[in-house]
Image (spheres, grey):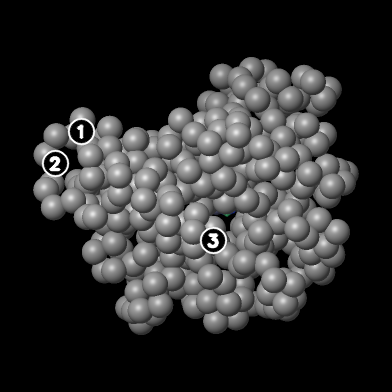
């Protein structure tokens, strides 16, 4: 049921945004590692950090672009050593997600980063998967895993990574593509995505975060992904917009990330509302919340205030999040019913 009245009361809208059930579909679990957790894990694992304190680390979170962020983000992952670390990291995120009324999350993880640090794929996947299995009882939500290939590495490395997870196949829902975008187009991973598709993985890819619309076209046509992560550059290509609208291909948009990484100069200039008005199936997500100044509800409340969005937009974005998720139809219906109940009240 779509509400017909537009609340003018911003406090009411902000409360509604926080209370409404939602799914989060674009969250890098390594990007949820808060500086406090980086320090405590560093201590527990005997890993020295280049920053003297939690405050000093947090102060370093000022970025010029995606690459300047990725450099510091990769440093943060160096404290992760054991299966328990991965379990704890995912649980810390899910506790925050539950507080934001997230009913379902699809968690990205960068296996190649961790195997590059000498960890076994089993430690990484089993720790994260155990957190997903315990999510319904611990946090009242469901969760699943999407492993992202690192696009700054080569095709051979992606194939080796895919090979490594085959014994863990049942614990991973999908495959994605992340890391430095410009100069690493989707075509580089055409064959390994084709193999992942044969193996039955759901497919997504970061495209059109910093790179031009051509990257979104090839994520769709070459990689044959089902969702586009970010995709905000699509607005520069009318034919692409038509394709995304006609086929209702979801975009997992991350407004605070886009401002922190200078994709848009300010939140007021973000194109989320323009994309929704054009008929795009957009969703709101946090990307790397420990680094970008807020979890999913902070993304909702700040973006709604900046763009003057309404309760109708809130309903549509929350509904889109369930529509775009990879959950099965009965669960999707149950979650949408819970969303409708909040808006009916
Ligand atoms: N890995 C973590 N966050 C990312 C982002 N915003 N873009 C690409 N790769 C990422
Ligand atoms: Zn991302």
Q: Position of residue 267 (x, y in %)?
A: 32, 45
Q: Locate the N terminus and report the quarter of the image it occupies.
A: bottom left
Q: Residue at x 65, y 25 (%)?
A: 37
Q: Nearer the viewer, residue 265 or 112?
A: 112
Say left or right for 242 vs 218: left
> Which residue has dot 2 on it?
7
Judged by depth in the image, the label closer to the viewer, 1 or 3, is 3
Say left or right for 258 vs 29: left
Say left or right for 141 vs 272: right
Numbered disc 1: secondary structure: helix
Numbered disc 3: secondary structure: loop
Q: Locate the C terminus and report the quarter of the image it occupies.
A: top left
Mark number, residue 12: 1
Q: Earlier in the sequence, mark 3 or mark 2?
A: 2
Q: Nearer the viewer, residue 81 or 335?
A: 335
Judged by depth in the image, the label closer to the viewer, 3 or 2, is 3
Contact between labelled residues 1 and 2, with CB atoms less than 8 Å apart:
yes
Numbered disc 2: secondary structure: loop
Contact between labelled residues 3 and 1, with CB atoms less than 8 Å apart:
no
Q: Is residue 142 visible?
A: yes
Q: Position of residue 235 (x, y in %)?
A: 34, 69
Q: Earlier in the sequence, mark 1 or mark 3?
A: 1
> Which residue has dot 3 on it?
328
Q: Residue at x 56, y 19 (%)?
A: 55
Q: Is residue 65 visible?
A: no
- The relative height of residue 88 versus residue 284 in the rendered view (above or below) is above
Q: Which quadrant of the view contains residue 238? A: bottom left
Q: Earlier in the sequence, mark 2 or mark 1?
A: 2
How dense is the environment of label 1, judged by Cα within 10 Å: few (below 14), some, or many (20 and up)? few
């Amino acid at each position: 049921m779509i509400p017909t009245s537009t609340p003018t009361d911003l406090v009411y809208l902000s409360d509604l945004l926080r209370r409404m059930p939602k799914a989060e579909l674009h969250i890098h679990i390594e990007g949820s590692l808060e500086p406090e957790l980086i320090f405590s894990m560093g201590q527990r694992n005997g890993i020295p950090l280049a920053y003297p304190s939690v405050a000093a680390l947090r102060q370093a979170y000022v970025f010029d672009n995606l690459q300047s962020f990725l450099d510091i983000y990769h440093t943060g992952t160096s404290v992760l050593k054991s299966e328990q670390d991965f379990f704890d990291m995912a649980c810390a995120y899910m506790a925050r997600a539950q507080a934001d009324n997230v009913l379902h999350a699809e968690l990205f993880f960068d296996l190649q980063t961790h195997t590059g640090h000498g960890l076994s794929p089993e430690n990484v996947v089993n720790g994260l998967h155990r957190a997903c299995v315990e999510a319904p009882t611990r946090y009242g939500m469901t969760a699943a895993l999407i492993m992202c290939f690192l696009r700054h590495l080569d095709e051979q490395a992606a194939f080796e990574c895919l090979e490594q997870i085959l014994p863990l196949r049942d614990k991973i829902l999908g495959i994605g593509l992340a890391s430095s975008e410009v100069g690493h187009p989707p075509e580089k991973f055409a064959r390994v995505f084709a193999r992942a598709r044969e193996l039955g993985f759901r497919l997504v890819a970061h495209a059109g975060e910093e790179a031009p619309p051509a990257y979104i076209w090839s994520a769709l046509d070459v990689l044959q992904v089902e969702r586009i992560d970010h995709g905000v550059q699509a607005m520069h290509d009318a034919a692409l917009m038509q394709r995304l609208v006609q086929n209702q291909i979801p975009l997992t948009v991350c407004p605070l990330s886009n401002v922190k990484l200078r994709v848009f100069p300010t939140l007021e200039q973000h194109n989320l509302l323009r994309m929704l008005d054009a008929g795009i199936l957009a969703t709101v997500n946090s990307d790397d919340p420990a680094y970008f100044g807020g979890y999913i509800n902070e993304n909702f409340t700040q973006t709604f205030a900046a763009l003057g969005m309404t309760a109708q937009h809130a309903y549509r974005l929350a509904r889109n999040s369930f529509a775009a998720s990879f959950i099965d139809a009965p669960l999707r219906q149950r979650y949408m019913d819970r969303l409708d109940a909040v808006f009916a009240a």
